[in-house]
Image: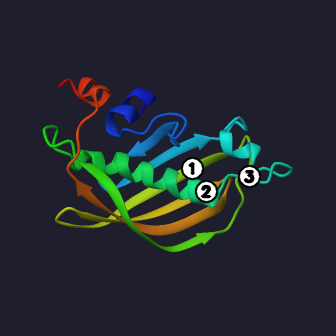
Amino acid sequence: MTRKAIEAAISHRDPFLLIDEIVEQDERRIVCRKTFTGDEFWFAGHYPDFPITPGVLLCEAAMQAGAVLLSQFVDGADGGVPVATRMSDVRFKQMVRPSDTIEIAVTLRERLANAFFLDAKVTVGSKVAVRFSFACTMTSGATSPEQAAARGE
């Protein structure tokens, strides 16, 4: 999926859009990729002598992938926005450094009305960088002009 399609699905933008491409997607699962160039703003101050991507940003990348997955449940007129309500069982296992490419896999485990329960795994190479479960609630929100145009509204 192209960057344009990602931007049509969620309202995140640079410098905080943490998905470069969508590799595969179906109704219950999405797989995305992100390559960290080393030019991202946090590398200058997050262990500058040994730069690593903050774990919380790896979690954010997974939640953005989850938001793209959940965008299929958004009614165009409503403009709903998935908002994270909890994270659990977060386990950081591998550092992500400049020039690394991560693969983000998010699976929708359960839906209860407007609450969605998901599992995420972020890998770098063949190693798990972080894995966790999270929940989102779909809230009402305005559709951005870019999202409306991309959807043909």
Q: Name the residue under label 2.
A: 123
Hey, which residue is sitting farthest bottom in the picture? 89
Say which amino acid is labelled 3: His
Element at label 3? loop
Q: Mark 1 points at which residue?
A: 103
Image coords of residue 81 (percent x, y): 28, 49
Say which amino acid is labelled 1: Glu
Q: Is residue 81 left or right of residue 39?
A: left
Q: Mark 1 or mark 3: name the one nearer the start of the chain.
A: 3
Q: Mark 3 or mark 2: name the one nearer the start of the chain.
A: 3
Query: Do the numbered discs 1 and 2 sit on residues whose CB atoms are within 8 Å?
Result: yes
Image coords of residue 20 (percent x, y): 52, 36
Q: In this view, does 87 lie to the left or right of 115?
A: right
Q: Indicate whether 53 appears above or below 76.
A: below
Q: Mark 3 points at which residue?
A: 46
Marks 1 and 3, Cα distance to the nearest angstrom? 22 Å
Using the rendered view, name the quadrant where residue 77 is placed: top left
Q: Mark 1 or mark 2: name the one nearer the start of the chain.
A: 1
Using the rendered view, name the quadrant where residue 144 is placed: top left
